[in-house]
Image (cartoon, rainbow, N blue to C red):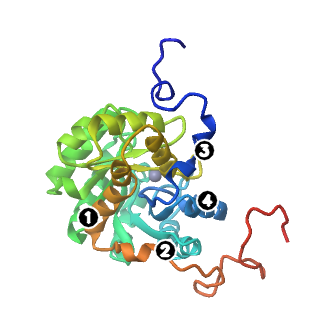
């Protein structure tokens, strides 16, 4: 490996692997604009809060298996604006969501029609900061049909759009997503193109859209690559998210990427833009985000519709470093 030029070779001081940790960004605050907390545990919430995540957006997505009826969507959307938001508040993290029919499920047209009917009941609710995550998966005609229909809904509601771009044939799928959004009269500043990589970022930025990057192990972006992208394109209109979900993923991807950027010599100002400020600016166009709400007061014995996160008379968790479980 004598001729490789990895980030470690260039920027991390030799012989100091122990300094390579999340403490490099202690005291900074983060906004994760794409994370599926419904699939995560309270330990994840605690770790995110400890690492400086003060607010997040949970986009509506699929369960990992097909839904059997519209009621499943109804309950899911209700939990995103209800119970999950409450659960997040119990760790001092402000929870927002985007509501939409995801591309994969758009292919069940009979069900998709019913979902389109209930979407307007949810997109106008408090704390809904966009229509998402929508777009292309396999780039089928049904996916296009419901992407277009939901762009119209976003336009009507005056909400930003959070666009999922496909894993396969990403470049073409990303271009189509942008072309179609423009066709429907959405301004590029109202559209957040997600899951970018080195192949798509240039065009997305040049056309005036927001470019989101998902730091997700093995499949999407690694954060060393993210450092290089930020170096190359600068921090304007770029944002980083974890997209942590029920798969092998990392809910600390945003603060970890910030730490890597810091240790790689990226300025605090640029780090703040890509791990906090740009996401706030983009999604605040919904009129739903007030940064004063980020400093949540935590009361773990609080209740949501009569239920608390404490099961069967548990006490609020105080000392998580103790090995005693009482
Ligand atoms: Zn997602």
User: Residue 107: image x %, image y %?
Assistant: 40, 49
SS for dot 3: loop
Q: Nearer the viewer, mark 4 or mark 3?
A: 4
> Quick check: 228 above or below 257?
above
Q: Residue at x 26, y 45 (%)?
A: 177
Q: Nearer the viewer, mark 1 or mark 3?
A: 3
Marking on residue 248: 3
Q: Residue furthest top?
A: 2
At mark 1, the secondary structure is helix
Residue 47 — which label? 4
Mark 1 or mark 3: which comes first in sequence? Answer: 1
Please state if 181 lies on the left or on the right of 269 as rendered. left
What separation in Å lies between label 2 and label 4 (alpha carbons)? Answer: 25 Å
* Label 1 close to label 3 by CB (< 8 Å): no
Distance from disc 2 to disc 1, alpha carbons, whole Å, reads 19 Å
Which mark, by number, is residue 233?
Answer: none
Question: How far from the left and from the top, in percent, is residue 161?
Answer: 29, 58
Q: Is residue 116 left or right of residue 81?
A: left
Q: Is residue 254 visible?
A: yes
> Upstream in the sequence, badge 2 or badge 1?
2
* First-in-chain label (3 vs 2): 2
Disc 2 marks which residue?
A: 78
Q: Nearer the viewer, residue 132 or 1?
A: 1
Question: Can see residue 220?
Answer: no
The Cα–Cα distance between marks 1 and 3, rounded to whole angstroms, is: 31 Å
**Residue identified by numbered label 1:** 154
Q: Count numbered badges in the picture.
A: 4
Q: Is mark 3 within 8 Å of ligand 1?
A: no
Judged from the image, the secondary structure of the residue bearing numbered disc 2 is helix
Quick check: 140 above or below 168?
below
Local packing at callout 2 (Cα closer than 10 Å; few below 14, some 14-19, many 20+) is some
User: At x 34% / y 32%, what residue is drawn?
Assistant: 198
């Amino acid at each position: 490996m004598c001729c490789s030029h990895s980030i470690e070779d260039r920027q991390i001081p030799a012989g100091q692997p122990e300094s390579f940790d999340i403490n490099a960004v202690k005291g900074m605050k983060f906004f994760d604009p794409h994370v599926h907390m419904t699939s995560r545990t309270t330990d994840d919430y605690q770790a995110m809060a400890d690492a400086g995540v003060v607010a997040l957006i949970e986009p509506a997505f699929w369960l990992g298996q097909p839904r059997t009826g519209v009621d499943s969507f109804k309950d899911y959307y209700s939990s995103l604006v209800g119970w999950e938001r409450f659960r997040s508040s119990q760790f001092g993290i402000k929870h927002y969501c985007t509501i939409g029919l995801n591309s994969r499920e758009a292919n069940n047209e009979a069900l998709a029609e019913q979902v389109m009917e209930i979407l307007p009941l949810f997109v106008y609710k408090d704390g809904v900061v966009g229509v998402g995550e929508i777009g292309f998966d396999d780039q089928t005609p049904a996916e296009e049909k419901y992407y277009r229909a939901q762009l119209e809904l976003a336009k009507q509601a005056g909400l930003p759009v959070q666009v999922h771009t496909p894993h396969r044939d990403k470049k073409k799928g990303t271009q189509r997503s942008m072309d179609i959004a423009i066709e429907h009269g959405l301004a590029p500043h109202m559209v957040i193109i997600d899951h970018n990589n080195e192949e798509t970022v240039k065009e997305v930025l040049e056309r005036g859209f927001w470019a989101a990057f998902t730091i997700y192990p093995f499949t999407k972006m690694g954060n060393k690559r993210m450092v290089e992208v930020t170096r190359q394109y600068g921090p304007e209109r770029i944002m980083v998210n974890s997209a942590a979900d029920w798969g092998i993923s990392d809910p600390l991807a945003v603060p970890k990427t910030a730490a890597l950027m810091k240790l790689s010599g990226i300025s605090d100002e640029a780090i703040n833009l890509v791990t906090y400020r740009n996401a706030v600016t983009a999604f605040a166009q919904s009129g739903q985000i007030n940064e004063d709400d980020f400093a949540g007061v935590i009361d773990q014995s609080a209740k949501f519709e009569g239920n608390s996160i404490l099961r069967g008379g548990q006490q609020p968790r105080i000392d998580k470093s103790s090995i005693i479980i009482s």
